[in-house]
Amino acid sequence: MKSIRVAVAAAAVGASFVALTACSSPMQAGAAAVVGNERISTGDLNRNVQEYEAALKQAKIEPSQLGVPINQFVLFRMANEAAYKQIAAKHNVQVSESEIDAALKDPGQQQSPEMNLLSKGVAPANARGYLRATLGVIKLRSQMGGPEDQNAQAKFTQELGSVVPVYNPRYGEFGQQGFVDPGRFGKPVQPPQQAQQQG
């Protein structure tokens, strides 16, 4: 059985995102989450979860290794992807197919590119969209001055804060510590952070 190291530490792109996420707005019927102007339907979430479960099975990875419920893991990834996509589009950041092709070959801190994507809640079927969104915000952050520049970081954090995900409470309550799993007596379940992709 293979092992997977889920990216749970606050990393490059996602670090500011957790603290800025809220759940105070009314939820649209049939939505798993609403992110800015994008609605993630429960149907889309279920399809993504099924694709992800199939990818885990093919890779001989037990879902229990994730340390978080699969639906929360995948929903968090989908919400990040939706927010990143909107922020990149707002600033007209373009990501080429060749940049995505290169990122598809990047193993990150895992033993293979496939495991790198799985560690972030991404099934192969959803890899290109996820990488386009993630590479877009990495480029944007670089254009703003990079992660070492405090002013650029503040500006980037402000951009992330402009697209706040609202999660359906049926998937758990989301706060600064991540999802809270009601089945664990209110113990916070840390969501996987989106680790920086190297383009």
Image (spheres, rainbow, N blue to C red):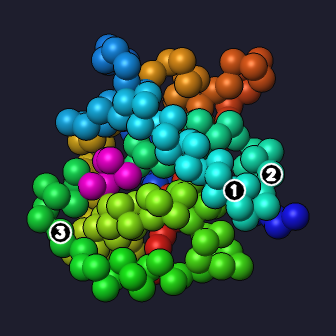
Q: Which residue is mark 3?
A: 93
Q: Residue 142: x, y in percent?
A: 29, 75
Dot 2 amino acid type = Glu
Instruction: Give 7 or 107, whichever is nearer the viewer.
Output: 107
Tag nearer the camera, 3 or 1: 1
Instruction: Give 153 or 103, whichever is nearer the viewer.
Output: 103
Q: CA distance from mark 2 to mark 1?
A: 7 Å
Whether residue 93 is situated above or below residue 154 in the rendered picture: below
Q: Label 1: how many residues lie within 10 Å, few (<14), some (14-19) or many (20+)?
A: many
Q: Which residues are magenta?
A: 81-85
Q: Is residue 24 left or right of residue 122?
A: left
- The overriding secondary structure of the stretch rendered in magenta is helix
Whether residue 35 is situated above or below residue 187 in the rendered picture: below
Q: Earlier in the sequence, mark 3 or mark 1?
A: 1
Instruction: Give 125 or 183, whichever is nearer the viewer.
Output: 125
Question: What mark, if any, has residue 56 been given in the picture?
Answer: 1
Residue 107 visible, this angle: yes
Q: Which residue is mark 2?
A: 62
- The residue tagged with tag 2: helix, strand or loop? loop
